[in-house]
Image (cartoon, grey):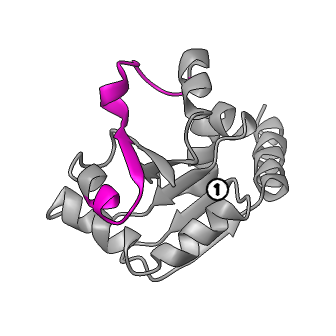
Amino acid sequence: MHILVDQTLAYEICPILEILGHEATYFNDLGVDALPDLESLEILQNYDCFLTAAIFRDPVEWLAIHEAMLRHGTKVVQLRLPKVITDPALDALRCLVPKMERWLTCVEEGCSLVVVSSGGMKVRGRMKDEVADMLRQRDDSDEVYR
C-alpha cells in the first residue's frame, strides 16, 4: 500500500512502514505547504491513504477541518494517540501495529475514514456515505446556532 504520512506524526514511522512492506512518503518531503489546498488534494490521488493523527478528539470537529480532503475521495486513516505522548514514533506504532491487518482491510474495502484507537485495539471504518451523513449532521447543527 502507498501511504502518505502526515506531518502530525513522527517521520520515523515511514521507514518502519517500509520494512512492513508498504511505500511510505512523509508529507513534509513533498514540498507542499499544508492540507487541504487544491494542489495537495491532487497529490493525494497518488496514494492509497493518508495517515494522520487525531489532533481533535471529536471526529466531527476533525471532519469539519478536513472536509475537502474527504469529499475529494481521499481515504484517511486517523490515529488516536494517547493524551500524554511519551515517544511520538513509538506511540503511533502502538496504534498502527496491533490491528494493522484490520485497518488495511478497511482502506482496501473503500472506507473513506478509518479511526484507530489509542493502543490500536479498536478500528472503526466509515464508508463515504457515513462520512457524508456525519458532515450533513454537522451542517444541520450549525444552522441551529445561526
Residue 109: image location, x then y, percent: 73, 65
146 up-or-down from 108: above or below = above
Question: Is 45 on the left-hand or right-hand side of 140?
Answer: left
Does residue 74 appear anywhere in the picture? yes
Q: Which residue is mark 1?
A: 113
Which residue appears at 41% of the width and 19% of the height? 32
Near-viewer residue (69 or 55): 69
37 up-or-down from 108: above or below = above
Question: Is 73 on the left-hand or right-hand side of 130?
Answer: left
38 up-or-down from 136: above or below = above
Residue 101: image location, x then y, percent: 52, 76
- In the image, the segment drawn in magenta is 16-36
SS at badge 1: strand
21 up-or-down from 132: above or below = below
- The answer to which quarter of the image holds residue 94 is bottom left
Near-viewer residue (79 or 4): 4
Does residue 55 appear anywhere in the picture? no
Which residue appears at 55% of the width and 48% of the height? 49
Question: Is 98 on the left-hand or right-hand side of 16?
Answer: right
Question: Is 57 on the left-hand or right-hand side of 44?
Answer: left
Q: Is residue 33 magenta?
A: yes
Which residue appears at 31% of the width and 29% of the height? 28
Q: Is residue 124 magenta?
A: no
- In this view, the residue farthest toward the left is 86
Mark 1 neighbour class, 10 Å CA radius: few under 14, some 14 to 19, many 20 or more: many
Number of marks present in the image shown: 1
The amino acid pointed to by label 1 is Leu
Which residue appears at 39% of the width and 18% of the height? 33
Residue 117: image location, x then y, percent: 46, 72
Question: In which quadrant of the rendered image does the C terminus lie?
Answer: top right
